[in-house]
Structures are given as structure tokens and as C-alpha cells.
Amino acid sequence: MRLEVWAPLARSVEVVGADGVRRMPLARGEHGLWRAEVPAGFLDAGYRFALDGGEPRPDPRSRWQPDGPHGASRPVDETGLRRHRRAGFRPAALREAVFYELHVGTFTPEGSYAAAREKLPHLAALGVTHVELMPLATFPGRHGWGYDGVAWYAPHPAYGTPEGLAAFVGHCHAHGLGVLLDVVYNHFGPDGCYAPAYGPYLTDRWKTPWGPAVNYDGRHADGVREFAIGNALMWLRDYGFDGLRLDAVHAIVDTGARHLLEELAERVLALGRELDREFVVIAESDLNDPRLVRPPALGGYGLDAHWCDDFHHALHAVLTRERAGYYEDFGSLAQLAAALRDGYVFQGQYSAFRGRRHGRPPEGVRPEQLVVFAQNHDQVGNRARGERLSQLLAPERLRAAAALTLLSPFTPLLFQGEEWGARTPFLFFADHQDPALARAVSEGRRSEFAPFGWNGEVPDPQAPETFLGSRLDWDERGRPAHAALLAWHRRLLALRRARRVAPGERPDVRFDEAEGWIAWRLGDVFAACNLSDAPRAVPFPDGAWQLALAEPAPAAAGAPIPAGATAVFTRGTG
């Protein structure tokens, strides 16, 4: 078996067997790569690398860490992973896509790939097109959000084996669902990170909210860039994922002429051509910067889409009337209308929250290139008590949130359980094994919420009940109020699939700030949300309109919209 490791500053490298006695030297190659042909049996029980005769450490590119990031590394049979592929499967194109974000550990009581795949018929019947998994890179402890991953190439062992993950992806494809993976290339977690012992993976030239930045533009950066890009290609090639969501790209610092994001997008495109598949690469960013999705020929990075926080903030502030923290910039129907038309609310205006101007116009950005949501893991889990909208809003406002998101022109995303108004919170939880780190995380969590004015006890991330209380209760779906909201989501998604919208079309949005209603037409669908406590006469577009969905329903198409109602109409007999 061929084994290699990047260690550009090392004078010698040995692979060390699980017994700590057997050793084999690796030969130095070009650009800091060390290689050796190793008998397969040498690695089966686990291995580590020793640099310059020092203490053996796990492989930074380990494909499997069954005993956690501090344990021995193990190889993975890539052909075994690929046997789960479904030949000829094609996920929905971005323009037809509806994403569903889930955390494997809390999606089911068992918290495993095997248990999650039992819920795939529910997702297929709901009408989503892609499952989006929160990060899977191995981190210390059993449970956590996954954004503190340290072994980027090794799926977290608490959820199942690497082959179990590949089988889950294959089962998603069998149900007609594409699969996206959230990956974190802007930092390493604080515990169990061995990559910096092998080379200059980090730099003190730049800082991120999580500490030193990853070295994508300094000396020896080529090896670090290949480490990240190779990881992206591995998930797509070996496990069968259909795309990636890149976490917090604003914290990826690269001052070179060819930004890491541009190179990554190009390499993914090349892999797609090689495999005759179409992948998507989506960035998380609140910069309101079209460069993320513009083609490189126009000075962009060539990504397929990016998350759009402005849509969420505008929607949340109107529906909940919260104004603390970043919600201080939002709260009007005019801003919600702008979000519904353009995605970006801030296009260069002054942001009071930031104390500066923010964003730029979304010129050249197609609607499907913006991913929008009423809820996601951040916007729920970064609340002190992890409250979902179902814990903050009355049912009529939950229906409005769903209609505004799912009937927007953008690519919508639902967060696990949102479709039935799950009442279980989604809290921030962790299982750090280092006592000092565990204390720091617990104390930091309590102090984090002072700017939002959220008082009272903040659940301890390290407490087992914080994690256990965040698991979905699937029995809720059978209770009347939850079943009604689930039916509402299914009907909205059916209307979204059936509507006729021209490529690039933006909605015609109307609103009345004083009367508290907002309405929009997109293609042959017209929707109105009356957020006031009295019936409102909403002007209809020209043409014959037929009521398709409403709660409560107006007397007829063109009649006043009842207080608190959301109503959806289709043109003609559609």
C-alpha cells in the first residue's frame, strides 16, 4: 500500500505500527512529500508517523480515526466506499433545488448514518431535493456541531464507519436526493490537531475568530492548499457527495493572485468532467459580495452559490420583532421586500450594527445562486436557549415564514424539523475532553450573549442533557398542529415545483408598512401574507387567479386577506 505524508521541514519520517515497535522509513520526494510502499498488514491495526525520531503522531490525512483524533490512524478501502455509488444518478439542478440541513447526531435518537437513512422517505415525500450534512471531520469526544474538526479526512466515528457514510449517500441517491457536505477550511479545532506538527499549516500573519489562520498564502502554502483541496475532492470522489458548503469563507485569508476558493472551484469542476458528474460548491458568507459567484473571467471565484444572511435577518426581525444584536439593522417590511427581490438588503448602505457601510449590489447574481432560510443551525443554535421559530412565533407566522422562504426566487434551505415546527431546541453542545478547554467553552458561552440582552441561565454546552435535549422528537409529526404545518410545507414545495418562472426572474413585490401586509408575484404564482390583526385588501396582479393554498382562506380570489393569513394563488386553472 502506498503511504505518503507532507512534512516539508522534516529531516526524516518513519511510519510506526500500532505496537509502537515496528517502523519503516519513508523516502523524501519533491515539495516536502515523503512516500513509502508499506505492506497492508502493517497498517491494519493502526499506524502513526514519527518525524525526526520524535513522538509518533496520527496521520494528518488519516482516512479513519476510530478511537478519536488522538488515536492511531487506519487506512480505508476506497473501492469499498465507491461500491455504494448509484450509476447514472443526477441530483436536481440548482435552479430546482431545495436543501435540507441536518446534524447526524441529533437528527435521530440514535444519532447515526444508519438511523438517518430510515428517515429518507420522509424527506423525499416532503419535496426537498438535497440533504446537507453538518461537518463530519473527526473532533474529540462523541458529540458536537462538527466545526471543531481536526482530522479533516476522517469521518467522525460516533456516527458510523466510513463505509456507513458512503452507504448513507448511496441511499439518499436511491431516494432521489442529492447530498451536500459542510466542510470547514478556515480553521482547525483547538484539541487533537496534529497537522501543524508536520508543517506550516498555520500562520501568525493573519488571525481568525478561532485563532491563527490557515496558511494559504505564505511560505510552503502550496502543500496546505493541496491539503484542503484534496479533502474537498475526496468527499466528492470517494464518498459520492454531490457538493460542498464551505464554512465562513470570510475567514479564509489568501492574498495571492489566485484565491484558494477560485482554485478549489476549478479543481471541483475538473473532477466533475472526469467523472461525468455535476457538483456544486456553496460558500457561507454574510459579506453580500457577488465576487463569490462571478466567473473568474469577471474577477470572481466561480463558486456556484452562497448563503444569504440578509434574507434571514429581514424575515426574522419582521416576524419576531427582535432588534438586539445584528437584528438592529432590520425590522421593516421595506427591507423584507428588498430581501425578497434581491437577496441582499445591504448593497453599500450604512449598517448601524457594523458601524460602517456594508455590501454591494448583486449585479450578475442569479436568484438560484443565493441560498435563503428562515432557520438554520447557526440562527437557531447561536441563540442562548436554542429556540426555533416554533418556540417564538404563533402558527400563522410560521406559515408566513415558510411561504416567504419556499416561494422566493432563491434556493431555499430548511433546518431539520422545521417542516413540522419541532419544539425541541437546537442548542450549542460539545464534548471536549480537555478539562481546561471544556471550562473555557462553558464560560465563554455564558458571556457571549451580553450584546443580545438575553438574560437567565445559558445551558452548559458540556452538559449531556444539552446534547440529548437537542435531538428531534419524530413522534411530534403525528400531533395535529405539527401535522398541519408539515402538510403546509409539503403543499408549498409542490407549488414551488409546479410554478413556471423564467430564468433569472425576480418577483414583483408590494407591501404596506402601515397596514402590515406583503405580497409578491413570481411567474404564475401570487402570494400574500397579512401580518396584521385585521383583514386587508391586497391589490392583485391583472389576470384570473385561483386560490391554491390559504390558512385561513379569503372568501374568494381578490377578496381581503383575513387577519394573520397567508394565501397563495395560481394563474388560471393551474
Image (cartoon, grey):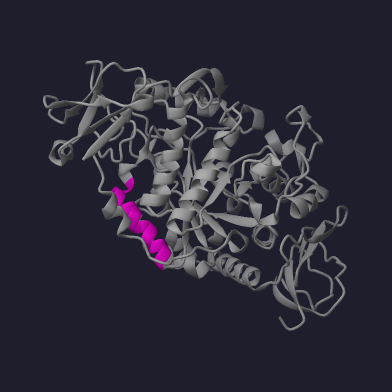
Q: Is residue 434 on the magenta stretch? A: no
Q: On the picture, is 42 further left or further right than 421?
A: left
View extreme (bottom): residue: 573
Is 162 contained in the magenta span?
yes
Up/down of 568 relative to 469, above or below? below
x, y (%) of residue 473?
44, 56
Inspect this view and state whether residue 348 appears: yes
Res 192 visible: no
Residue at x-position 43% and y-position 62% = 475
**Residue nearest the observer in this picture, 78 or 118:** 78
The residue that appears at 63% across and 61% down in the rendered structure is 95
Q: Residue at x 39, y 57 (%)?
A: 169
Where in the figure is residue 135, as x and y percent of width and height? 44, 43
- Expressed as whole percent of the image width and height from the top left, the position of residue 330 reads 76, 42
The quadrant of the image that shows the N terminus is top left
Quadrant in which residue 555 is drawn: bottom right
How many numbered discs sit on the rendered protein?
0
Hey, which quadrant is residue 328 in on the image?
A: top right
Q: Is residue 462 left or right of residue 51?
A: right
Q: Quadrant of the C terminus?
A: bottom right
Q: Give whichever of 68, 212 is nearer the camera.
A: 212
Residue stretch rendered in magenta on the structure: 159-174
The secondary structure making up most of the magenta span is: helix
Examine the rendered structure and indicate whether residue 40 appears above or below residue 35.
below
> For this view, does 84 lie left or right of residue 184?
left
Task: Please provide percent x and percent y for residue 195.
Answer: 37, 26
